[in-house]
Amino acid sequence: MSAHPESVSRAGVAVAVPGLALTAHGIATGSAPGSAGIVLCVALGAALAAVVARSGQRVSPIRAAVVLAVGQLFGHPAAGVGDVVGGHSAHLTGVLAWHAVAVPVSAALLVVVARCAALITAVLTVLTSGPAAVAVGEARLFGDGWRPGLAVAGAGSAPRAPPVHR
């Protein structure tokens, strides 16, 4: 169970950047981008995912939107590399509208998915961690010391119960 929010955010950036750029390019030109454009967009997504990984900070909706916007700024022209279809200035309004809606929505989805993955991972970790036997002492008001007993204790995240004595 190692799905940390940061790794989910990195994977989301690596998928969302080329996905948004290639989709916007396809909408603008009405054709699929060439293989060179696809490779450049995927490389850009991987590079931005590495930037997210190096920052080490929790990915907020604002940071995710900035990373995705930078990805679109460079990804959309990269998608056109090697394209036989000419410019797409006739569809510029549609492209800008697509980016204006897709970037913040994708950023919000990235953050929600990362936080849900962290929650699910935490729950699964608690559910799959087995209890551990721990020797504890029994406090006695009268007598000559303490007598060791046996208690079952979890990993610290399960509800606490009284110790079990023999």
Image (cartoon, rainbow, N blue to C red):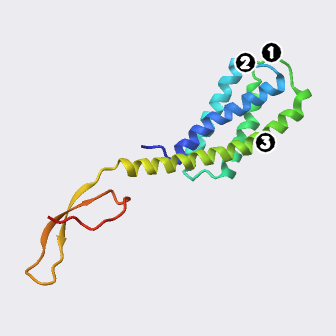
Q: Which residue does the image show at 55% across and 48% down from the upper left? A: 116
Query: Given this view, does label 2 or label 3 mark the residue nearer the observer?
Result: 3
Query: Given this view, does label 1 or label 3 mark the residue nearer the observer?
Result: 3
Question: Left or right: 55 with respect to 78?
Answer: left
Residue identified by numbered label 2: 34
* Numbered disc 2: secondary structure: loop
Looking at this view, name the residue that lies furthest to the bottom. Answer: 142
- Which of marks 3 and 1 precedes in the sequence? 1
* Numbered disc 1: secondary structure: loop
Residue identified by numbered label 3: 101
For badge 1, the amino acid type reads Val
Q: Position of residue 41 (x, y in %)?
A: 68, 29
For badge 2, the amino acid type reads Gly
Q: Position of residue 130 (x, y in %)?
A: 30, 50
Looking at this view, name the residue that lies furthest to the left. Answer: 144
Mark 2 surroundings within 10 Å by alpha-carbon count, few (fewer than 14), some (14 through 19), many (20 or more): some
Measured in 3D between alpha carbons, the distance from the residue under mark 2 to the one under mark 3, in whole angstroms, is: 25 Å
Taking depth in this image into account, of 89 and 148 the one nearest to the observer is 148
Measured in 3D between alpha carbons, the distance from the residue under mark 2 to the one under mark 1, in whole angstroms, is: 8 Å
Taking depth in this image into account, of 56 and 117 the one nearest to the observer is 117
Question: Are the two marked residues, 2 and 1, in contact with CB atoms closer than 8 angstroms?
Answer: yes
* Numbered label attached to residue 84: 1
* Numbered label attached to residue 60: none
- Which of marks 3 and 2 precedes in the sequence? 2
- Which of marks 1 and 2 precedes in the sequence? 2
Which part of the image, by quadrant, shows the C terminus? bottom left
Q: Which residue does the image show at 37% across and 62% down from the upper left? A: 159
Q: Which residue does the image show at 83% across and 33% down from the upper left? A: 95
Q: Which residue does the image show at 62% across and 34% down from the upper left? A: 15
